[in-house]
Protein backbone atom coordinates (compact mmCIF):
# COMPACT_ATOMS: atom_id res chain seq x y z
CA UNK A 1 0.00 0.00 0.00
CA UNK A 2 1.33 3.38 -0.99
CA UNK A 3 1.24 6.23 1.50
CA UNK A 4 0.44 9.73 0.33
CA UNK A 5 1.64 12.82 2.07
CA UNK A 6 -0.79 15.56 2.88
CA UNK A 7 0.42 19.10 2.70
CA UNK A 8 -1.55 21.70 4.55
CA UNK A 9 -1.34 25.24 3.28
CA UNK A 10 -1.87 27.90 5.89
CA UNK A 11 -2.53 31.43 4.74
CA UNK A 12 -1.25 33.94 7.21
CA UNK A 13 -3.35 37.05 7.08
CA UNK A 14 -3.22 40.01 9.30
CA UNK A 15 -5.91 42.40 10.33
CA UNK A 16 -6.35 45.68 8.51
CA UNK A 17 -4.43 48.46 10.18
CA UNK A 18 -6.07 51.85 10.73
CA UNK A 19 -3.72 53.20 8.04
CA UNK A 20 -4.98 50.63 5.50
CA UNK A 21 -8.62 51.40 6.29
CA UNK A 22 -7.88 55.11 5.94
CA UNK A 23 -6.25 54.49 2.53
CA UNK A 24 -9.20 52.30 1.49
CA UNK A 25 -11.60 55.16 2.23
CA UNK A 26 -9.36 57.73 0.52
CA UNK A 27 -9.29 55.73 -2.71
CA UNK A 28 -13.06 55.26 -2.83
CA UNK A 29 -13.85 58.85 -1.82
CA UNK A 30 -11.83 59.96 -4.85
CA UNK A 31 -14.27 57.99 -7.04
CA UNK A 32 -17.28 59.64 -5.42
CA UNK A 33 -18.27 56.91 -2.96
CA UNK A 34 -19.71 58.39 0.22
CA UNK A 35 -19.53 57.29 3.83
CA UNK A 36 -22.97 56.35 5.15
CA UNK A 37 -23.28 57.47 8.79
CA UNK A 38 -25.76 56.45 11.51
CA UNK A 39 -27.45 53.84 9.32
CA UNK A 40 -28.18 56.27 6.50
CA UNK A 41 -29.14 59.38 8.44
CA UNK A 42 -26.19 61.26 6.99
CA UNK A 43 -23.63 60.87 4.21
CA UNK A 44 -20.10 62.26 4.04
CA UNK A 45 -17.87 62.84 1.03
CA UNK A 46 -14.82 64.94 1.86
CA UNK A 47 -13.62 67.07 -1.01
CA UNK A 48 -10.80 67.27 -1.77
CA UNK A 49 -9.30 64.08 -0.36
CA UNK A 50 -5.72 65.06 -1.12
CA UNK A 51 -4.20 68.50 -0.93
CA UNK A 52 -0.60 68.81 -2.06
CA UNK A 53 1.45 66.01 -0.58
CA UNK A 54 -0.94 65.08 2.24
CA UNK A 55 -4.53 64.23 2.98
CA UNK A 56 -6.77 67.31 3.09
CA UNK A 57 -8.09 68.75 6.35
CA UNK A 58 -11.59 67.76 5.19
CA UNK A 59 -10.56 64.14 4.75
CA UNK A 60 -8.66 64.04 8.06
CA UNK A 61 -11.71 65.45 9.89
CA UNK A 62 -13.96 62.89 8.19
CA UNK A 63 -11.57 60.04 9.12
CA UNK A 64 -11.48 61.15 12.76
CA UNK A 65 -15.28 61.36 12.87
CA UNK A 66 -15.74 57.92 11.26
CA UNK A 67 -13.56 56.37 13.98
CA UNK A 68 -15.46 58.08 16.79
CA UNK A 69 -18.42 56.61 18.70
CA UNK A 70 -20.53 59.61 17.61
CA UNK A 71 -20.57 58.31 14.01
CA UNK A 72 -22.55 55.22 15.02
CA UNK A 73 -22.60 52.43 12.45
CA UNK A 74 -20.93 53.86 9.37
CA UNK A 75 -19.76 52.20 6.18
CA UNK A 76 -18.67 52.96 2.64
CA UNK A 77 -21.49 53.33 0.14
CA UNK A 78 -22.00 50.05 -1.73
CA UNK A 79 -20.61 47.89 1.09
CA UNK A 80 -22.04 46.35 4.23
CA UNK A 81 -18.98 46.25 6.51
CA UNK A 82 -18.85 49.00 9.09
CA UNK A 83 -15.67 50.98 9.67
CA UNK A 84 -15.55 49.50 13.19
CA UNK A 85 -15.69 45.98 11.70
CA UNK A 86 -12.89 46.78 9.27
CA UNK A 87 -10.75 47.92 12.20
CA UNK A 88 -11.34 44.59 14.00
CA UNK A 89 -9.10 41.55 13.70
CA UNK A 90 -11.58 39.78 11.38
CA UNK A 91 -10.91 41.91 8.30
CA UNK A 92 -8.04 42.82 6.03
CA UNK A 93 -7.75 45.11 3.02
CA UNK A 94 -6.65 43.61 -0.31
CA UNK A 95 -6.88 44.50 -4.01
CA UNK A 96 -10.03 43.67 -5.98
CA UNK A 97 -9.15 41.22 -8.77
CA UNK A 98 -11.48 43.10 -11.13
CA UNK A 99 -10.52 46.73 -10.63
CA UNK A 100 -7.35 46.59 -8.47
CA UNK A 101 -8.90 48.95 -5.92
CA UNK A 102 -8.75 48.12 -2.20
CA UNK A 103 -11.59 45.98 -0.84
CA UNK A 104 -12.29 44.41 2.55
CA UNK A 105 -11.76 40.65 2.90
CA UNK A 106 -12.96 38.67 5.86
CA UNK A 107 -10.09 36.86 7.52
CA UNK A 108 -12.29 33.95 8.55
CA UNK A 109 -15.09 32.44 6.54
CA UNK A 110 -16.29 33.26 3.06
CA UNK A 111 -14.93 36.34 1.32
CA UNK A 112 -17.15 39.27 0.48
CA UNK A 113 -18.77 38.76 -2.91
CA UNK A 114 -18.95 42.38 -3.92
CA UNK A 115 -16.62 45.26 -4.51
CA UNK A 116 -17.62 48.91 -4.10
CA UNK A 117 -16.89 49.22 -7.84
CA UNK A 118 -19.84 46.97 -8.74
CA UNK A 119 -22.25 49.91 -8.96
CA UNK A 120 -19.90 52.40 -10.66
CA UNK A 121 -20.88 52.70 -14.32
CA UNK A 122 -17.97 52.18 -16.70
CA UNK A 123 -15.57 51.07 -13.98
CA UNK A 124 -12.86 49.95 -14.15
CA UNK A 125 -11.76 52.43 -16.78
CA UNK A 126 -8.09 51.86 -17.58
CA UNK A 127 -7.98 55.10 -19.60
CA UNK A 128 -8.45 57.22 -16.46
CA UNK A 129 -5.84 57.62 -13.74
CA UNK A 130 -6.55 55.52 -10.67
CA UNK A 131 -7.14 57.24 -7.33
CA UNK A 132 -3.93 57.76 -5.44
CA UNK A 133 -2.44 58.36 -2.05
CA UNK A 134 -0.65 61.57 -1.08
CA UNK A 135 2.92 61.73 -2.38
CA UNK A 136 5.70 63.56 -0.59
CA UNK A 137 7.27 65.11 -3.68
CA UNK A 138 10.47 66.19 -1.93
CA UNK A 139 11.05 62.72 -0.49
CA UNK A 140 10.28 61.13 -3.87
CA UNK A 141 12.75 63.43 -5.68
CA UNK A 142 15.42 62.78 -3.03
CA UNK A 143 14.96 59.04 -3.55
CA UNK A 144 15.44 59.43 -7.32
CA UNK A 145 18.55 61.55 -6.68
CA UNK A 146 19.93 58.93 -4.29
CA UNK A 147 19.38 56.14 -6.84
CA UNK A 148 21.13 58.16 -9.57
CA UNK A 149 24.10 58.89 -7.31
CA UNK A 150 24.29 55.20 -6.33
CA UNK A 151 24.30 54.25 -10.01
CA UNK A 152 26.99 56.81 -10.80
CA UNK A 153 29.16 55.49 -7.96
CA UNK A 154 28.65 51.94 -9.25
CA UNK A 155 29.73 53.00 -12.74
CA UNK A 156 32.83 54.72 -11.36
CA UNK A 157 33.73 51.62 -9.32
CA UNK A 158 33.37 49.39 -12.36
CA UNK A 159 35.55 51.66 -14.53
CA UNK A 160 32.80 52.49 -17.01
CA UNK A 161 32.89 56.24 -16.50
CA UNK A 162 34.82 56.81 -19.72
CA UNK A 163 31.83 55.62 -21.80
CA UNK A 164 29.06 57.23 -19.75
CA UNK A 165 29.10 60.57 -17.97
CA UNK A 166 26.08 61.22 -15.79
CA UNK A 167 25.13 64.85 -15.41
CA UNK A 168 26.65 66.04 -18.70
CA UNK A 169 25.50 65.77 -22.30
CA UNK A 170 26.86 62.94 -24.40
CA UNK A 171 29.99 63.85 -26.32
CA UNK A 172 29.93 60.94 -28.74
CA UNK A 173 28.80 61.41 -32.30
CA UNK A 174 26.59 58.76 -33.84
CA UNK A 175 27.54 58.38 -37.49
Image (tube, rainbow, N blue to C red):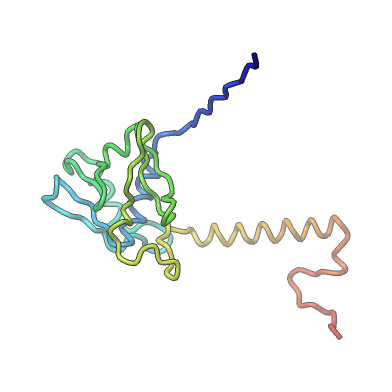
Q: Residue at x 54, y 25 (%)?
A: 8
Hey, which residue is sitting farthest bottom in the picture?
175
Q: Position of residue 55 (x, y in %)?
A: 36, 56
Hey, which residue is sitting farthest top in the picture?
1
Look at the image and tell me whether residue 92 can be seen. yes
In the depicted view, which residue is nearer to us: 5 or 47?
Answer: 5
Quarter of the image where one finds residue 129: bottom left
In this rendering, the answer to whether 131 lies above or below 24 is: below
In this rendering, the answer to whether 136 lies above or below 81 is: below
Q: Position of residue 123 (x, y in %)?
A: 36, 63
Look at the image and tell me whether residue 57 can be seen. no
In this rendering, the answer to whether 148 lies above or below 85 is: below
Position of residue 129 in the picture relative to residue 104 (left or right) = right
Q: Position of residue 152 (x, y in %)?
A: 76, 61
Looking at the rendered image, the quarter that the C terminus falls into is: bottom right
In the depicted view, which residue is nearer to us: 31 or 65?
Answer: 31
Looking at the rendered image, the quarter that the N terminus falls into is: top right
In the depicted view, which residue is nearer to us: 37 or 10?
Answer: 10
Q: Position of residue 165 (x, y in %)?
A: 80, 70
Position of residue 171 in the picture relative to residue 96 (left or right) = right
Q: Residue at x 85, y 65 (%)?
A: 161
Tag count in the figure?
0
Position of residue 51 in the picture relative to residue 146 (left or right) = left
Amino acid sequence: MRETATIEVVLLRSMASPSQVKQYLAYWFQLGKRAIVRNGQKTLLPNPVIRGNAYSREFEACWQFLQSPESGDCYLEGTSQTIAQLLSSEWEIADCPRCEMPIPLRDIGLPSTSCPCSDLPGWPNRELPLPRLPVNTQRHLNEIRRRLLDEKQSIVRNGKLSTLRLGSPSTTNDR
